[in-house]
């Protein structure tokens, strides 16, 4: 699945106009990789724009510098740019606006294991912990210009996808590439503050509320909370701000599975599940038609929130390990 | 302040019995460095024991393997071992039991900038982010035997003192040494789970309680909480378990200084302060006779907890930056 990096270098060097796209509901690796690659291309004297279906990404606005993230337009730019997809496992996840363009993807640079290789050039390495890691190595190996702003964007991609180098099967190469990005000018202290210590007071209140609601089951091997539709309005937050709060439930050493159920409407519930490395939680999400990663899955169900909670508790128990 | 690593190597190679000591109220770097060094010495065929004033360190018990952390006895072992201090800025902080031995420290390996060099051989490097980093480099440069168990202990020292590679002015060398420890057999995923996701249910309840007690002042640029003497008994926790909870207050982007005041007794109060990188908080701790690092200081005061809280709020405000 790895086309030669030389083909990629040839594309970058020979063409003059590019668009960089990443997946819907972008995370730090999607945005960091997009901006990092765009800044490299810009430094090579290329014309480049960064698009995402959701438009500008507030949490990572500090990375944008001279290249903004724009909402993907419904028609492609008129100068026939080459299309580069980063951190996106399928063509569809590039978003509806891009799909309407009806044109092929020229290069696909990704680390998702289920990426089928949907572009002319496919650089997919499932072993990389972040697409930004792959891009950092590509830039270093091909001698592409990696200035401090590009290095910073790629550093944030690695920082977010590795959860600040924690709770992941980290490769030594990832740490060495992060070190190389620091040498290229990324400021790890500032970047980690901006990336992780960016809660609004309202989001802090939401965290407090969630910890207060957290309950435990199955000899404290399951921790969970339930969100009702009024919560965001009441705390002045949005559903994007609740992402990653399951990490806090996973602080407890007895907890093997943490989950949340969120009432979207009286008959529609969103669920999100996390597990320790020894447990594959995907089968539980799959029962509700969902999917994801081994230790981080999710789904939606056309059922009331209490009913999903009840069914989940029953479905998770057979996957638990004996308590210690 | 850096004696040649060769003097250290000579000591390790020529002598046959060692004790390794670290500072009172040991953290992950104190314990990780002690055990890491002891395992290296053991692999060199030496007799070695690890002592700490507080005795065995529960949170890091998973590191001990074949070398337990023992409570420092009031008399030295009878075979006249060489005394190695790790991660300890002063002789006094090795603890009362050791001081009663009335013997000199043979080697002092540390990264605290205020270390005066109290031993015969002093390897103090303030630029290192953890004493474990210094030990890892020493082992690699001198070709000392670094097996997976020693590498794991040193990895945890780096992981804890760098706050999982975040919120610190990280050097690329630190990440490269961490990568070398992974190559030597440290398992970063398992070690970060054991190090950071080890809360008891009681400690989780303590966190919940603290977040509920957290208050904000000075246009939300200060966040703080007060602990009373009954809290630990009521939640079944100890004062060691409250360490690092100020990190959670620092999640809020407006917060420049976070502090806690803890009632030890009606006329004795412990305080702990944290600041953003742009603020040096040591002068505030110094007003109460305390000290520490630029962004993490503490002190004790013979005053009631309410009075210390009041004085701290007043003392911090002049150090704040304008709100955004």
Image: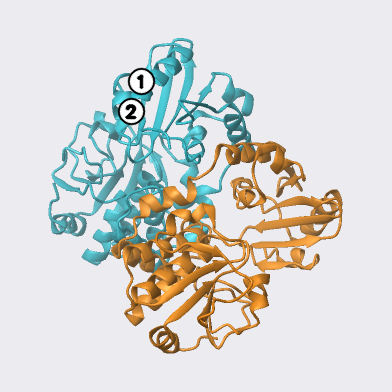
Chain colours: A cyan, B orange
Say what secondary structure mark 1 lies in: helix
Q: In which quarter of the image is the C terminus of chain A?
A: top left
- Is residue A159 visible to us here? no
Foreground of the two, B47 or A223: B47
Q: Is residue B212 left or right of residue A171?
A: right
- Residue B96 found in image quarter: bottom right
User: Which residue shows up at 13% across the image and 44% down it?
Assistant: A120
Q: Determine which of the numbered discs, if any, sits on residue A319 in the image.
A: 2
Mark carried by residue A155: none
Left or right of B160? Residue B46 is left
At x 32% / y 37%, what residue is drawn? A23
- Height in image: A186 above or below A222? below
**Mark 2 neighbour density, 10 Å: few (under 14) some (14–19) many (20 or more):** some
Mark 1 surroundings within 10 Å by alpha-carbon count, few (fewer than 14), some (14 through 19), many (20 or more): some
List the residue tagged with mark 1. A315
Mark 2 belongs to which subunit? A
**Image coordinates for residue A226, horizontal then vertical, percent:** 52, 22
Residue A81 coordinates in the image, percent (x, y): 23, 46
Give the residue drawn at x 33%, y 30%.
A281
Disc 2, SS? helix
Q: Position of residue A210 (x, y in %)?
A: 57, 30
Subunit of mark 1? A
Residue B244 lies, in percent from the top left, at 60, 52
The residue drawn where x is 30% and y is 65% is B184
In the picture provided, is A177 more to the left or to the right than A247?
left
Q: Is residue A152 above or below residue A221?
A: below
Q: Nearer the viewer, residue A79 or A251?
A: A251
Figure quadrant of residue A322: top left
State left or right for residue A313 relative to residue B275: left
In front: B303, or B215? B303
**Real-space Cα distance between discs 2 and 1?**
8 Å
**Residues at circles 2 and 1 in contact by the CB criterion of under 8 Å:** yes
């Amino acid at each position: 699945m790895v086309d030669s990096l030389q083909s990629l270098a040839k594309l970058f060097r020979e063409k003059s106009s590019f668009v960089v796209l990443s997946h819907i509901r972008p995370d730090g690796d999607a945005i960091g990789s997009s901006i990092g690659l765009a800044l490299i291309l810009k430094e090579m004297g290329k014309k480049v724009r960064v698009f995402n279906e959701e438009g500008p990404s507030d949490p990572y606005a500090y990375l944008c510098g001279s290249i903004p993230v724009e909402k993907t337009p419904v028609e492609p730019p008129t100068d026939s740019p080459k299309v580069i997809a980063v951190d996106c496992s399928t063509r569809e996840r590039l978003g509806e606006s891009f799909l309407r363009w009806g044109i092929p993807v020229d290069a696909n640079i990704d680390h998702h294991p289920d990426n089928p290789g949907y572009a002319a050039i496919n650089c997919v390495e499932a072993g990389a912990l972040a697409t930004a890691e792959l891009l950092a190595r590509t830039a270093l190996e091909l001698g592409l210009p990696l200035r401090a702003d590009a290095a910073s964007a790629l550093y944030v991609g690695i920082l977010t996808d590795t959860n600040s180098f924690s709770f992941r099967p980290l490769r030594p190469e990832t740490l060495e590439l992060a070190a190389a990005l620091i040498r290229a000018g990324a400021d790890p202290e500032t970047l980690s503050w901006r990336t992780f210590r960016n809660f609004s007071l309202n989001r802090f209140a939401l965290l407090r509320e969630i910890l207060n609601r957290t309950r435990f089951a199955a000899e404290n091997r399951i921790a969970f909370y339930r969100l009702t539709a009024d919560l965001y309005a009441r705390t002045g937050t949005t559903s994007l701000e609740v992402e990653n709060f399951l990490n806090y439930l996973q602080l407890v050493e007895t907890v093997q599975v943490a989950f949340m159920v969120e009432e979207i409407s009286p008959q529609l519930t969103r669920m999100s599940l996390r597990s320790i490395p020894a447990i594959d939680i995907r089968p539980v999400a799959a029962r509700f038609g969902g999917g994801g990663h081994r230790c981080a899955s999710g789904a939606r169900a056309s059922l009331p929130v209490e009913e999903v909670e009840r069914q989940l508790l029953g479905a998770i128990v057979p996957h638990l390990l004996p308590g210690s």
